[in-house]
Amino acid sequence: MLSGLGDAGSIANANASATNITMSGYSITASFAQYITQVAAGQDHTVGLKSDGTVVAVGDNLESQCNVGNWTDIVQITASGSHTVGLKSDGTVVAVGRSDDGQCDVGGWTNSIRVAASWAHTVGVKSGGTVVAVGRNDDGQCNVSGWTNIVQVAAGGYHTVGLKSDGTVVAADLEIELSKWNLGWATP
């Protein structure tokens, strides 16, 4: 604790990660750490969401999957294979990286509340509980347009799973039969 310096004369920006504080003729630069609040891992890269809504990434960047340095206002991240997806606070979605199957074609998504990524497809939950998906659909993993009351999604390599608000689970894949698991889960 510093004493004898008097009252703070000015604080440049109290909400910034670094700011200048002037008091009694002294100028101090204060730097406040931005903590990582969420992590996601792709095939060969790792992504971190910082407490200020920015994103950092390290690892293999051959497909530009680590080009997240200009992302702001992000509230959720997900990564898989060679792409990275971010959910912005306004409900829009951004994505970078490999998109040869269209897995990064999320530019028109709005009102999103959750996102999930697999190596070749990306899934999003809308604020009304409906679901959208883009990317490879060889096994029906993007066949989610009829889903309702979804609160969370997960994207596997060849399937998509959704958690409904009533606790039941739905799956999109030509091969998955969750009813055989005898867990009370349902298929659409």
Image (tube, rainbow, N blue to C red):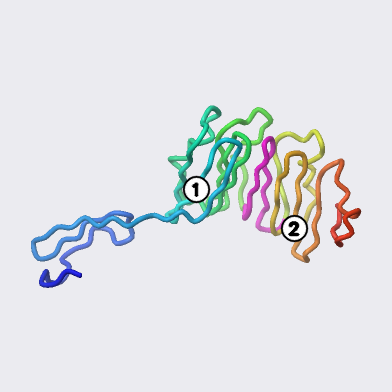
Mark 1 or 2: in front is 1
* Magenta stretch secondary structure, dominant: strand
Quadrant of the image containing the N terminus: bottom left
Mark 2, Cα crowd under 10 Å, few <14 / some 14-19 / many 20+, is some
74 drawn magenta: no
Q: Which residue is mark 1?
A: 48
Give how far across and how far down residue 49 sits, in percent. 49, 50
113 drawn magenta: yes
Give how far across and how far down residue 90 sits, in percent. 53, 53
Left or right: residue 4 compared with residue 99: left
Q: Residue at 78% x, 66% y: name it.
A: 166
Q: Which residues are magenta?
A: 112-129
Circle 1/circle 2 CB separation < 8 Å: no
Please state which amino acid type lies under the numbered disc 1.
Answer: Gly
Q: Which residue is mark 2?
A: 163
> Regarding mark 1 in the picture, which secondary structure is present there?
strand
> Regarding mark 2 in the picture, which secondary structure is present there?
strand
Q: Residue at 84% x, 59% y: name it.
A: 185
Q: Residue at 29% x, 54% y: name it.
A: 18
Please state which amino acid type lies under the numbered disc 2.
Answer: Leu
For the residues labelled 1 and 2, the Cα–Cα distance comes to 25 Å
Please name whichever residue, 44 or 137, is drawn nearer the observer in this view of the structure.
44
Point out which mark residue 62 bears: none
Q: Residue at 52% x, 32% y: name it.
A: 60
Please name whichever residue, 91 or 114, is drawn nearer the observer in this view of the structure.
114
Looking at the rendering, which quadrant does residue 31 occupy?
A: bottom left
Please name whichever residue, 90 or 77, is drawn nearer the observer in this view of the structure.
77
